[in-house]
Amino acid sequence: MVKHIGILTAGGDSPGLNAAIRGLGKGATLAGNIQIIGFRDGFRGFMENRFIRLQGETLANILTLGGTILGTSRDKPHKMPVGGKVMDMTDVLLDNYRRHHLDALVCIGGGGTHKNALRLSQKGMNIITLPKTIDNDVAMTDVTIGFDTAMEIATTAIDRLHSTAHSHHRIIVVEVMGHNAGWLALGAGIASGADVILIPEIPFSVAKVASAIQQRMHRGKNFSIVVVAEGALSDEDAAGSEKSAAKTAAKEGKKKEKLKKICNSLAQYSVHGNINTLRLSSQLEELTGLESRITILGHLQRGGTPSAADRVLATRLGTACIRAIEAKQFGVMVAARGESTELVPLAQVVELRRTVPLDHPWVASARMIGTCLGD
Ligand code: F6P
């Protein structure tokens, strides 16, 4: 009997999504009894029944392509903006699931997608997920599709910032993505030899960061590279009570709006930029006497062709997904585990976010080579 499988990509894109779609599509084609349709633009396209058949030519020449041929969105089935209102469209998705006689729906995404996928699975759909996000913060998998490429992009960018920081005797504060997890900042920071790496998991003291830069100055190094994850917080901000945090957020929201207006035109700041990065840069200037510049890598980190490691990972997960479908294993994520893969119940995946453990070997190595982590 022919099986009908739907597939969609949701949340922020990441390099390697097309490699995963290809792995799944080619695996299904060769299995012979599986037909795949791809829904456009994540859960929105599934709701609006916009799709393409994934076979033959559609799957050709996409292995090296960045982004996703299906398109993506951050829309949630149970909170979908429709005609100016936010509505629960889960039943419409269920209708489309039945209309296409789907035996399963494969959702490729990050933390948010996994929560949505679990909800759909609880509504009776056969769901399988693949983990992707450049943030690498999906629980219960060793790594996510896109992380390796993003780490490489950030590393190359920081390598280039080194020479200009050195020539101008400046601090360069480089903001990389990662609202909740510091994998990207830590990985790219270690790989590029950053002097300071600040991640959300380790609240930083501005004074300690400044002192690390001053110690370098005493050694004749009048420049420093500070890699900061967008979600990194100073110890003061991290310790603030909820009330004061809310107050600060409101105040900083206003400040940010003002700053955006001023800085956008100066190309110093992107809409994605974090107010904390701006503040950190000016505080470091004040405390060290060195000039400081900010570089926000932003969406550059999500674009372009996937690395070899991401292509291999995506192909491994995509083909393992075919095996799971054939074994009728649903309500699970196909996780990367060492050289192999493992099926993990979605309920376990959504329980936690995978942040950097404070005793992680990357943290230990960074400390051992004298990198300041701000604490
Ligand atoms: O994909 C995850 C992520 O890269 C975060 O690190 C980042 O904050 C967010 O996406 C921004 O995505 P967008 O601008 O597409 O909403």
Image (cartoon, rainbow, N blue to C red):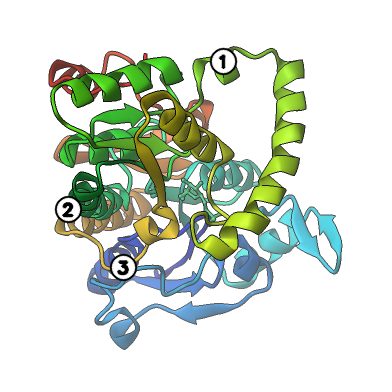
What's under tag 3, amino acid-wise?
A: Gly
Front residue of 72 and 194: 194
Front residue of 302 and 78: 302
Decide: few, some or many residues near mark 2? Use Cα within 10 Å; few <14, some 14-19, many ≥20.
Answer: some
Q: Looking at the rendering, in which quadrant would you find the N terminus?
A: bottom left
Give residue 189's position: percent from left, percent from top: 25, 37
- Rendered image: mark on residue 248: none
Front residue of 241 and 260: 260
Answer left or right for 19 relative to 1: left
Answer left or right for 204 relative to 80: left
Give residue 115's position: percent from left, percent from top: 57, 40
Q: Circle 1 is placed at which residue position?
A: 236
Front residue of 264 and 72: 264
Q: How many numbered badges does the structure rendering display?
A: 3
| Distance from Cα at disc 1 to Cα at disc 2 | 39 Å
| Distance from Cα at disc 3 to Cα at disc 2 | 14 Å
Q: Circle 2 is placed at which residue position?
A: 309
- Rendered image: mark on residue 304: 3
Decide: few, some or many residues near mark 3? Use Cα within 10 Å; few <14, some 14-19, many ≥20.
Answer: some
| Distance from Cα at disc 1 to Cα at disc 3 | 37 Å
Answer left or right for 262 relative to 316: right
Helix, strand, or loop for circle 1?
helix
What's under tag 1, amino acid-wise?
A: Glu
